[in-house]
Structure formats: C-alpha cells, structure tokens
Amino acid sequence: MKILIINGPNLNLLGRREPEIYGNQGFEAFFDTLKKTFPAHNLEYFQSNHEGAIIDKLHEAGFSADGIVLNAGAYTHTSAAIADAVKAIDAPVVEVHISNVFAREAFRHHSFLSPVCAGIVCGFGLQSYRLAVESLLHK
Ligand code: DQA
C-alpha cells in the first residue's frame, strides 16, 4: 500500500520544539524506523508550514495513495480549507496528534478535520503515527 504522512506547521521542529510535550526525536529519524516497521509498504513523508501547500499535497496524493496520515498541527483547529480538501479526495485520511489534545487548552479540543477523517489517533507520542498507519492497513 502507498501511504503518505503529512505534517503541518511547526512539526519540522520536532525534537527541538517543546520537548516536554512533543519528545526529543526529530521526525526524519523516527520516519526511518517507521519505514523499517512496514517494509512491505510504500511510506512517504511531506511537511509544510503553509496551509495551501498542504492542500496541494492532499490533492496530488489523494487520488492515488491508499491512505494518508495527517497531522495538520494548529491548522487542525482553524482550517475549513484543509477539511474541504480531505472531503474532496478519495484516499482515507487519519487525523493524528502527538499530544493528547483533549488534555490541553480548550482551543485544541475542536478539530475541523475529525468529522471528515476516517479516524483519529492522538496522545501516543510519535507512536500515534505508527498506530495510524496500522489502522489504514486494516481498513
Ligand atoms: C499537534 C497538536 C496541535 O494542537 C498543535 O498545534 C501542534 C501539534 C500534536 O501533534 O499534538 O502543532 O497536532
């Protein structure tokens, strides 16, 4: 299966950004391990700090990938445009968060994406991505 992971704003700083919340590991190193966990599948990774670039990537991959894992960062809580893009494409999208957003500030409790996603994984650190990939393999 072809599975694309999309990370949104500030997630390029994983490992350095608020490590008490997001941990000490950069995403690239984690992604290498993740690919080894799923050797039979084609995992790709894209990160952008720009809403439009995330939408472009969803359009580009959304009709050919078998599934998309999306951590839209703070756009989760603000972006009707990314939600519309998720709705527009064929591929199932799993919403992911590293932290347990429901245990944090109230503004993080609302997601524009949850109603249009196949499911949500949050609160398991970087393992949230592995669990999301697993869920797509069993869809
Ligand atoms: C996040 C949670 C969001 O609220 C936050 O804005 C992020 C990261 C997470 O992975 O826990 O940037 O999506």
Image (tube, rainbow, N blue to C red):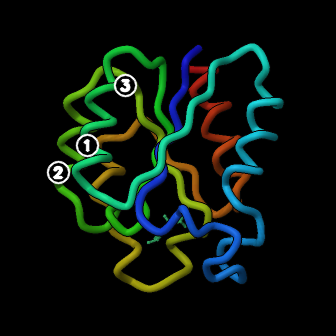
Q: In terms of secondary structure, where does tag 1 sit?
A: helix
Return the residue nearer the eye: 29 or 71. 29
Position of 88 compared to 39: left or right? left
Q: CA distance from mark 2 to mark 3?
A: 17 Å
Position of 87 compared to 99: left or right? left
Q: Earlier in the sequence, mark 2 or mark 3?
A: 3
Q: Are marks 2 and 3 in contact (CB under 8 Å)?
A: no
Q: Relative to 61, say whether 45 is above or below.
A: below
Q: Is mark 3 within 8 Å of ligand 1?
A: no
Can you identify the residue that label 2 sits on? 81
Q: Is mark 1 within 8 Å of ligand 1?
A: no
Q: Relative to 7, say whether 45 is above or below.
A: above
**Residue pictured at 28% horizontal, 47% vertical:** 53
**Residue pictured at 32% horizontal, 63% vertical:** 75
Q: Position of residue 60 (x, y in %)?
A: 30, 26
Q: Which mark is residue 55?
A: 1
Q: In terms of secondary structure, where does tag 3 sit?
A: helix
Q: Between tags 2 and 3, which lies in front?
A: 3
Q: Position of residue 68 (x, y in %)?
A: 46, 32
Q: Are marks 2 and 1 in contact (CB under 8 Å)?
A: yes
Q: Earlier in the sequence, mark 3 or mark 1?
A: 1
Q: Relative to 135, say whether 137 is above or below.
A: above
Q: CA distance from mark 3 to mark 1?
A: 10 Å
Can you identify the residue that label 3 sits on? 61
- Amino acid carrying label 1: it is Ile
Position of 60 compared to 137: left or right? left
Q: Earlier in the sequence, mark 2 or mark 1?
A: 1
